[in-house]
Amino acid sequence: MITENTIKLGGPSLPAGATAAASVKRSVERARLRRLVRDLLLVSPLFLFLLVVFAAPIALFMYRAVDNSLLHRSFPNTNAALAGWESPDPIPEAAFEALAADLKAVADPAALAIIARNLNNFEEGYRSLLMKTANNLPPEAPASWRDAFATIDKRWLDESRWAILKQNTGPWTSNFLLAAVDLKREASGEIVRVVPERRLYVPLLLRTFEISLTVAVICLLIGYPTAYVLTKLPSRPAGLLMICVLLPFWTSLLVRTTAWIILLQGNGPINSTLQLAGVIQQPLELIFNRFGTLVAMSHVLLPYMILPLYAVMKSIPETHMRAALSLGADQRTAFLRIYLPQTAPGIGAGLLLVFILALGYYITPALVGGPRDQMLSYMITYHVNEVVNWGMAAALALLLLAATAVLLLVLGRLVKLRQVIG
């Protein structure tokens, strides 16, 4: 029996109100789906743009850290001949013959030069050895390829040369990643640390973190009171001071760094003024050292500290401090216990932003720093531009990215732990 409050739907009777609610729910879900599709279509051009010009190039660059396809494609016979050989067993005659065939088959001299340079990264002298051998191979097959190679250069009788070749003839290699953390693979395959006097990249990474953290702290010490004054000044003076804060954004990085070179040099305005005032007798060494690096980097990155602090401080009601003072707290106690904790998000954001930006700095330390003040980005640029070793550059970039990610993860855990404890 169907009443005015029920409706028959090919089965049990349902209340008319429940049917209407289900219909409305389906309509809302369809509208939400259409809105989601519309939003995705709107942001898809930006997503594709970032994917093509940002994410994909970075991924391809990082891939170079493990890519060994050029050597693998160029030396297929050598790879097969050395598959069953292990050091310190005698080098098989077939390996010499296979290497000779592969060297003759490499038609592009530039490709062979790249292969030789990559092998030279694992043992000095390998580049000259391989190029010398390729240029002096006999045109006809000799009675013994072992003797022919020994005639060209006796270093081919050393098993370590062939062990390096075997380790680098596969499509993938971990040698660049190992070198990035001052490790190397022995001829036996064992991974060991390089000798102390040749450890370069780990100390360079630690120096990069040290300089970046120091710059972040300097920016905090200068930026916090500046942001505080900005929030307390009337609108017109505050606007003028904000323009001064934003001036570095409107000036080229190279121009700003060059200006610091002029200011800090031995006969520059700062040293000249101090000498005229009788404060110093001899010019101070303010440039081409750690001091010049910290000053120039802090000047460039200071706005990135002030702006997050200013945004947070501006949102703090002044009634909070007045309430603390009215309850008997002095200015120092009210600031430390009421105002400072509320600015913690701005402090954290500013420190993180300045620290991450400082990690990748190259131009400023290169121009105003000394040899012991260069950062990891300098070595990445060196491998890209000077020695054209993209694999090593990619490994160092991956090391810097991984170290930064681990640091951020640890900081995130500490913040969450502090919130739980608090």
Image: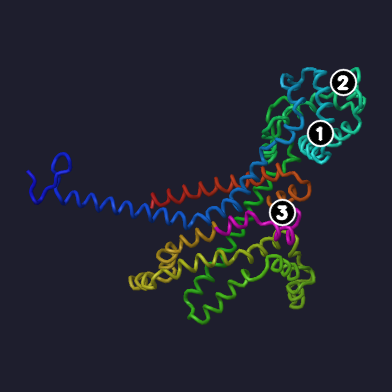
Question: In the displayed structure, would residue 374 be above or below residue 307?
Answer: above
Assess disc 2: are there few (<14), some (14-19) or many (≥20) residues with their C-alpha within 10 Å of its C-alpha: some
Amino acid type assigned to the residue bearing label 1 in the image: Val
> Residue tagged by mark 1?
106
Quick check: 49 left or right of 291?
left
Nearest to N terminus: mark 1 or mark 3: 1
Magenta span dominant secondary structure: helix
- Which SS class for mark 2? helix
User: From the viewer's perspective, is the residue at label 1 or at label 3 nearer?
Assistant: 1
Residue 273 lies in quadrant: bottom right
Residue 77 lies in quadrant: top right
Amino acid type assigned to the residue bearing label 2 in the image: Arg
- Residue drawn at the location 73% of the way across and 32% of the way down: 73
Nearest to N terminus: mark 1 or mark 2: 1
- Which SS class for mark 1? loop
Q: Which mark is residue 374?
A: 3
Question: In the displayed structure, would residue 70 be above or below residue 54?
Answer: above
- Residue drawn at the location 82% of the way across and 41% of the way down: 110
Q: Report how far apart the C-alphas of labels 1 and 2 lie in the structure.
A: 20 Å
Q: How is the image coloured?
A: rainbow
In this view, the residue in front, 323 or 239, is 239
Nearest to N terminus: mark 3 or mark 2: 2
> Residue tagged by mark 2?
146
Asked whether the residues under the numbered discs 3 and 2 touch, taking CB atoms below 8 Å apart as contact, a structural biologist would say no
**Residue 40 at x, y = what percent?**
45, 54
> Does 218 appear in magenta?
no
Bounds of the magenta span?
353-373
Quick check: 349 left or right of 100?
left
